[in-house]
Image (cartoon, rainbow, N blue to C red):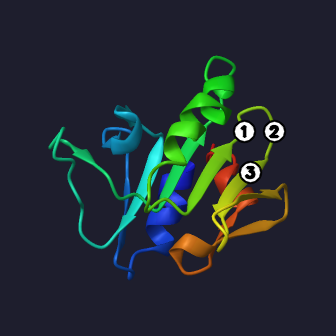
Amino acid sequence: MAVGIELGAALRHQPCRVFSPDLRIRIEETDLTTCADASVICGKLERSSVDPLAVINPVLLVEALSDSSEAYDRGEKFAHYRRIPSLREYLLVSQREPRLELYRKNDEGRWELFEAGPGTTLPLASLGGIGLATDAVYRDPPK
């Protein structure tokens, strides 16, 4: 939720929207429909012809890592996501420590890893370079 809130605030005046896990993501090439913990789509939503309730054009997908999902999110699920033509970045959010891991598709089509820990900000190239501050994502709720 914290990532979605931070992204939503940063994208308020941009042509991009942040979506909750309720949005279905379709990977046409691998015939998989799934959900991400958060997703960002810029411009018009493009619907799948196979599953009209699913979209096919996210630019950023976010997964919060848990003990039960981490291997799948890093492995098989990311392998599916890499087949989405519009996808530019994949963000993994640790639940164990304040750490963000961002995989970014470079101009050669290779995925590069960028990491951010406490006190650092991760620039999101797919969203015009807006920054996602690790401390904001992991801020303690007010008491």
Residue 136 rendering spot, x and y as whole percentages: 67, 59
Residue 61 rendering spot, x and y as whole percentages: 50, 51
- Taking the spot 63% from the left edge, 64% from the top edge, the residue there is 109
Alpha-carbon span between mark 1 and mark 2? 6 Å
Q: Is residue 71 above or below residue 26?
A: above
Q: Taking 103 as reference, is 119 left or right? A: right
**Do tag 1 and tag 2 residues touch (Cβ < 8 Å)?**
yes
Judged by depth in the image, the label closer to the viewer, 1 or 3, is: 3
SS under mark 2? loop
- Dot placed on the residue nearer the N-terminal end, 1 or 3: 1
Looking at the image, can residue 38 be seen? yes
Q: In this figure, which residue is indicated by the disc labeled 2?
A: 97
Q: Amino acid at mark 1?
A: Ser
Query: Residue 122, labelled with which disc?
Result: none
Q: Taking 40 as reference, is 131 left or right? A: right
Residue 49 rendering spot, x and y as whole percentages: 16, 46
Q: In this figure, which residue is indicated by the disc labeled 3?
A: 101
Q: Is residue 142 above or below residue 41?
A: above
Q: Is residue 62 above or below residue 119?
A: above
Q: Is residue 115 above or below residue 74?
A: below
